[in-house]
Amino acid sequence: MKQNWITAAYYRGGTSKGVFFQAKDLPTDNQEELSKIFLKIIGSPDPNGRQLNGMGGGVSSVSKSVIISPSKRDDADVDYNFIQLAVEEPVAEWNNNCGNLSGAVGPYAVNTRIVKSKEGENKVRIYQVNTDKIIHATFDVKDGIASVEGDYSIAGVAGTGSKVRLDYLSPGGSGTGKLLPTGNVVDEIDIEGHKKIKVSIIDAATPLVYILAEDLGLTCVESPDELDSKSKEMELIQKIRRKCAFMIGLSKSEKEAPMNTPRIGIVSKPKDYTSLDKSKVSAGDHDICTRMFSMGKTHKAIMGTACVNIGVAAAIKGTIPFQVKREGANDLELRVGNPSGIIVAGSVIKQDNETVEAVSAVMYRTFRPLMIGKVLV
């Protein structure tokens, strides 16, 4: 088999890492062929779950690829396509966005000269291909390079970095075309062998299913390892997720539900807990507590698109997140407790008795280029 070296870069964006490619450097534009290439590069499938033979790291948050190209749209500077790679299975899914890696897209576009920059604050307009949405990334540039150093910290990433502001314009309906895919703020569903379960399904930046933690016999302050060890509860969570995928038209059946959409999470009122770095998080420090699940595992922080989503969901009257958030919480700066600490999300919502609209949502990330070079296929 002929060996091919493909120009690439390895970037951290938020609490994720991914291999970045320019579309012009890829040997094909065929999605099926590209999926095979990306799986090979990332080291999947790996029955050992470690991806030692590739660029991945054995968890969904670092098993990702990104394609960037100049945009032909009047409202965007670059097109951004995201591919989530499974770890243990030969699965490449092109149906969702990574909000964390979105924080590296603008800096990557500047660093590779796809977008012309200026000294100081820059804004890159991103067309997110998977979700057909526009994101504005605002960040600092110095000497023609996106600034990495700064004093902004995010939960789950050691140290500090330069802040990247991400504005999601009209984030509703990214996966289903509707902010409320079922038309309801709360639905009650039947799961075989279990009592009826109440869920809120919100599609903002990504479709996401919310469940009250206590309805599953959980506290919402368990660590990711603790949750992953609860096989009965994890199986139930995935059954709910697959049922909801079918309900909102993301799959033809529950069995055919994609691995990475809809996302799913449990929520509760703010509680005291210990974060992964052993810091004590007080109930008074956050407005809502959550544990999110990605590709069948508990996320060690929170997916970027899930951060956008919970900011929107908690602002919509009647949803499960709205019911458990702290009374008087600021919807523009919602403090979200997660396994790695606290992250801030915000949204602007228009709601009356008949309609609800997500006008915009905002989140903040940091980024860092880790490598530029070539990867072998």
Image (cartoon, grey):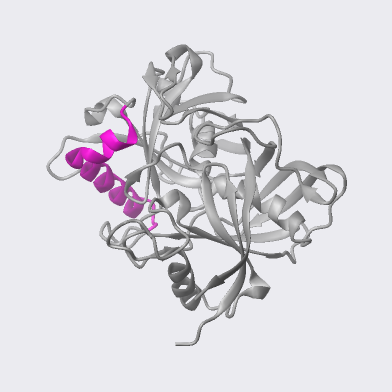
Q: Residue at x 34, y 25 (%)?
A: 221
Residue at x 25% of width, y 35% of height: 197
Q: Identify the residue at the far right of this view.
A: 119
Vertical arrangement, residue 119 with respect to residue 256, above or below: above
The magenta segment: 222-250
| Residue 328: % across, % down | 53, 13
Q: Main secondary structure of the magenta part?
A: helix
Residue 318 visible, this angle: no
Looking at the image, which residue is at 35% across and 68% down? Answer: 90
Q: Nearer the viewer, residue 122 or 203?
A: 122
Residue 207 part of the magenta segment: no
Q: Relative to residue 114, is residue 250 drawn left or right? A: left
| Rendered position, 199 above or below 23 | above
Q: Position of residue 292 (x, y in %)?
A: 39, 38
Residue 304 locus on image (x, y percent): 53, 42
| Residue furthest out toward the left | 193
Asked which quadrant contains residue 270, the reply is top left
Q: Position of residue 1 (x, y in %)?
A: 44, 87
Choose between 351 and 166: the one closer to the eye: 166
Q: Is residue 17 above or below residue 264?
A: below
Q: Is residue 40 left or right of residue 159?
A: left
Task: Please name the residue shown 61% across and 49% down the image.
Answer: 102
Total tally of numbered discs in the picture: 0
User: On screen, 343 above or below 241?
Assistant: above
- Is residue 243 one of those drawn in magenta? yes
